[in-house]
Image (cartoon, helix red, strand yellow):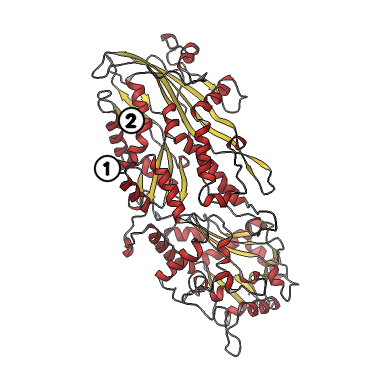
Amino acid sequence: MKKLLSLLSIFSLTAISGLTVIACNKNTNQEPGPGKPIITDEQINEYKTELDKVLINTFLDPVTQGKATHIIKPGIPEIPGTTIFNFEALQKQFPIDNNNDNKVQTLWKAGEASNPAVESMKKDLQQILHEDRFKDHYHQQTQTGDNFDKYKDMVINSWQDTFNGFVIQDNLTLKGQQFLSKPETKDVKREVMYTFNFNLAIDVNYFNADKIKTPYTTNPIPVTLTIGEEGAVIQIIQDLAISLPSELLVNREQTAQFKFEKLKTTEDHFKNYGDLQKPIANYINEDDGVFEKNLKNSIERITKGKVPAAKVKFGSEITTEKDVKVSDILFGTGNDYRQVKLLNDFANNGLANSLLLKPKEQAAMDKRQAMDLINKNVFKSVINPKSYDEKLSKFLTTYIKDEASLKKVVDEVYTYGTFSLKNITIQIPEQDSPVPIEVELPTLLIPWTYANDDTSGGNTYTSKIDAFLSSLYDSIKFVNQHLWSVNTGEKVKETLFAMGPEATQDYKDYYHKVTKKPWEQVKKELADGKEIQLSDKGSFGTPESGSLAGSLKKAPEMKFEGFKSWINTNYGNNLVIKKTSDGRIGLGFKKGLSGTDYKKVLLDYKIDFGKTRIQARMPWRGDSGGATGDLTGNLPGSLNNDFYGKDSDGNKIDETKYFKQAIANPDWLLFELDQIK
């Protein structure tokens, strides 16, 4: 007997990416004023990501998953209070018979006014995604561990005051199916099943810097709700929805435990760290690839014996790059202000003068020493690896029950998240028919982890922290040769930093973009004595799509995906693009500044290695005419004592003296971009 009805086509849903690279903004460099917390746009974006996770984790909660596929059977009635996700109501309103075979209907289309179907679904969702589960996950994501201090000025303590309601996005669709099934040990049974598909978000509130409630709509996730009477087919769907997330993590193939060696074949120049959404999606979608084979094996293990000879069929894409979500990263720094205080006294800071900004020709500081300094003096000021491990362990506990296995995964994993699986069909032979029943699985949210198991180049680190720090050290060393490096000898007295050709081109491209003028025209205006101020936002540098990033992408020495760098300045626009008397073009102090006016200039230098940011603050910010050891701790390690050069008597020039001379010298540049001959 053929399948009798398809009320509605399954709508192919794609979750909107919720997690983006944090962008800089004009508030980034402000420091807190008395009595008022400073909340930057970046911090708000990070907090919004935590709110996105509240929805994801509540939907993945076993209590929710147990309701998302609801089987009506003795002892298990309808979910109390439901009106549309209700089997009896659906059979009355959308009865299945031969007259409406292959009928397609959409209950609500995006862009239309809300209707009774949408409002009924929102009410039913209050029973499926219960308030108690939201409360728990909201508390865990925003009010525990490091996040308590990080978000305390934005958190609204009560979930009732935070939550504003459910939002159904895109289309709300329903698919009704009727078929006959015959499990191996039972008689032929008529089964009826209904499936809803839609994208779900929630409206929430948070406090802005003025303690005003501010609304936010989370990024949506794909939701599939299935309901029907007890039967073999719906039981398979429920078993897969509940069991497959754990199965893919703990099966012998460790299908969803991604590692460098697994993913490196997905694209040219794959990096050890950074943005993993695209590589993971490529790996999952590889035709007849390892993931699909292991996924098929897992599905067959779960369904074995329940329906004979069931087969698995995959669509052309079973996930997308946007469907891969990142929950947390071991060294995801965001834009924490505390870090810049540790990287500003360049002459006394080995990380700055002997690694990050060292002269190109100078050997870098010892690797082990640098790794320890970065971890202790930079990351530990803003990151708590123990807190990360605790959150990771809580995330995995739902799926990995064995404590030894859980600890092993936690000890390895650098980042983790979820991805959506869709377009997967189970083909079930139908009684007395050559055409099988095709049951499309609901869109499933699957947990994933990533660990760096790269052993190339003699990497023998067993600690995930050491493996990361080793890769970061190698990448910083390589970037130093292409981005900023301090000049030496007499050159440093006129121009502090040298830049590589790719970075120089990126800066020229930026000025072309903001001035809407070709670089040669910019040069001509500069030759006529004009100074070009920076934009009001004061942010410019080498973007992910720029010349430098493209060059670094191809280099095996660079271990991070998603590299970019930039500098932030304050509103005074005291730094300008100008021409010196000897024809050099670059960034320097504007005309009219003198004395200690250099301290009015705020400039932060920021480098993103994937989701890990290192940032240094220009030392002229020091309130006493130069940064002090109290801010930096005078970090040891291969110090370059001649960072600012020497005077005519051979004495080392300190920072205060250097910048006083710089502001008095109209030909001084922070860095040089071009020359006019």
Question: Which structural element holds mark 1?
Answer: loop
Question: Which structural element holds mark 2?
Answer: strand
**Residue at the spot of label 2:** 313
**x and y percent of residue 94 in the render?**
48, 13
Residue found at x 46% / y 46%: 326
Q: Residue furthest left?
A: 185
Q: Identify the amino acid type marked 1.
A: Arg
Using a 10 Å C-alpha cutoff, classify the residue at mark 2 as few (fewer than 14 neighbours), some (14 to 19) or many (20 or more).
some
**x and y percent of residue 42 in the render?**
59, 51
**Residue at the spot of label 1:** 252
* Horizontal arrangement in the rendering, residue 356 relative to residue 597 (left or right): left
Of the pair 345 and 98, the residue shown nearer to us: 345
Q: Earlier in the sequence, mark 2 or mark 1?
A: 1
Of the pair 524 and 659, the residue shown nearer to us: 659
Examine the image and state in which quarter residue 657 appears: bottom right
Residue found at x 40% / y 45%: 280
- As displayed, is residue 354 above or below residue 417? below
**x and y percent of residue 537 in the render?**
66, 56
